[in-house]
Image (tube, rainbow, N blue to C red):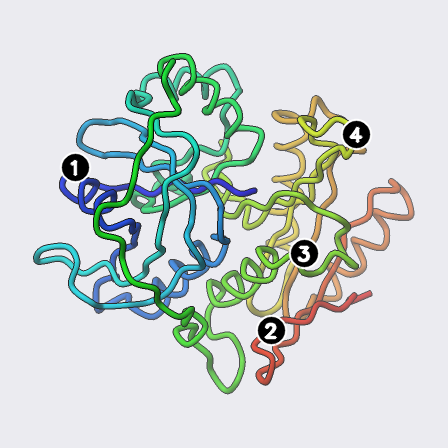
């Protein structure tokens, strides 16, 4: 089950809890379309009953714990005074109501010891802050344990005082297309994250148990998508990972180098150089001959395959189909 962190200020936090609602802001007019699809690509990862945490920016506190009450939607009905946060998701109380929050310093300590690694208040690229991000199940268990340490009476009852009314799922209407194709790379990411949240593509990737997007690295860049595969016998152990790099158009040598850099970084920093734990995948509308040639040679000489998947958008199904490009 995925876990999502929404950033809010103190006033908005009270409204979120009172109305049972979390939301993302509408981007400014000059960068509206591309940023909208970027927000959608994050929201599409939220499924019903996923756990929700809220990071209160002013007090630097992490509060929880709620669950998604249905799928996200777009709605401009006034909720917050003088502000519009139209990308919304209803929330409900979970079985855990933690009165005492985690402090940011506590989370940073967990980061410094390597127990938390996808926590991302700021973009790894250095270009602004996140309004929402997700953490892995493995990291959530660490955070949950920290909450239990400081909340001996965690089962206190809680309720949503003014529940927000039901709203139909409608986010697909806001993905930008051009000539019947995804218009931006964020558009492709939105469609992929929606599919992964629905458990699709297992015939290609296998039975993944967790999916993160925009995963921070120390390279100053973010991995587009990271799939995780739980050990079915030891369910608190991640058996393997699949790093996915996404391009809207042609996947060239520069994109390939970026994917290989992520692979090297992940091997060194996350899995103690265990090659069997990491797979790599490229998704694009086409691939350069140079990329295809390198991938074939790498598999032949090094036995290290890279999946090259060409996407096609099926308008009638509003879905991406992935096909082997080799």
Closer to the camera: disc 3 or disc 4?
4
Q: Does 91 sit above or below residue 32?
A: above
- Determine which residue is flagged by label 1: 10
- Determine which residue is flagged by label 3: 282
Q: Position of residue 92 (x, y in %)?
A: 37, 46
User: Could you tell me how far apart the alpha carbons at marks 2 and 4 are, in whole angstroms?
Assistant: 33 Å
- Determine which residue is flagged by label 4: 233
- In the picture, the quarter occupied by the C terminus is bottom right
Q: Specify which label sits upstream in the sequence, 2 or 4.
A: 4
Closer to the camera: disc 2 or disc 4?
4
- Determine which residue is flagged by label 2: 319
Closer to the camera: disc 3 or disc 2?
2
Task: Check disc 4 and report its element: helix, strand or loop.
Answer: loop
Mark 3 crowd level (few <14, some 14–19, many ≥20, 10 Å Cα)? many
Q: State if disc 3 and disc 1 touch (CB < 8 Å).
A: no
Q: Residue at x 67, y 60 (%)?
A: 200
Q: Specify which label sits upstream in the sequence, 1 or 2.
A: 1
Task: Check disc 2 and report its element: helix, strand or loop.
Answer: strand
User: Could you tell me how far apart the alpha carbons at marks 1 and 4 are, in whole angstroms?
Assistant: 42 Å
Q: Does 19 sit above or below residue 60?
A: below
Mark 2 crowd level (few <14, some 14–19, many ≥20, 10 Å Cα)? some
Closer to the camera: disc 1 or disc 2?
1
Q: Does 250 sit above or below residue 133?
A: below
- In the image: residue 155, left or right of residue 104: right
């Amino acid at each position: 089950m995925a876990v999502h962190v929404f950033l809010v200020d103190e006033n908005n936090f009270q409204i979120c809890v009172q109305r049972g609602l979390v939301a993302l802001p509408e981007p400014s007019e000059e960068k509206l379309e591309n940023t909208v699809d970027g927000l959608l690509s994050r929201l599409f990862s939220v499924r019903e009953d996923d756990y929700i945490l809220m990071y209160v920016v002013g007090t630097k506190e992490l509060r929880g714990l709620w669950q998604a009450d249905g799928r996200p939607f777009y709605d401009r009905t006034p909720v917050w005074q003088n502000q519009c946060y139209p990308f919304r998701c209803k929330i409900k109380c979970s079985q855990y109501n933690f009165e005492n929050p985690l402090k940011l310093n506590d989370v940073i300590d967990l980061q410094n010891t390597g127990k938390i690694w996808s926590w991302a208040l700021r973009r790894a690229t250095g270009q602004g802050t996140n309004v929402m991000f997700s953490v892995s199940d493995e990291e959530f268990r660490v955070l949950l344990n920290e909450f239990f340490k400081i909340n001996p009476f965690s089962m206190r009852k809680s309720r949503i005082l003014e529940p927000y009314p039901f709203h139909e799922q409608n986010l697909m209407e806001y993905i930008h297309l051009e000539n019947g194709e995804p218009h931006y790379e964020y558009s492709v990411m939105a469609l992929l994250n929606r599919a992964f949240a629905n458990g699709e593509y297992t015939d290609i990737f296998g039975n993944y148990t967790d999916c993160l997007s925009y995963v921070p690295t120390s390279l100053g860049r973010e991995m587009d998508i990271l799939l995780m595969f739980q050990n079915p016998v030891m369910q608190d152990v991640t058996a393997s990972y699949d790093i996915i790099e996404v391009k809207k158009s042609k996947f060239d040598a520069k994109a390939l180098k970026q994917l290989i850099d992520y692979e090297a970084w992940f091997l060194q920093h996350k899995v103690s150089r265990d090659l069997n734990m990491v797979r790599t995948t490229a998704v694009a509308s086409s691939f350069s001959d140079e990329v295809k040639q390198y991938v074939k040679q790498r598999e032949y000489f090094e036995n290290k395959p890279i999946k090259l998947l060409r996407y096609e958008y099926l308008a009638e199904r509003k879905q991406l189909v992935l096909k082997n490009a080799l």
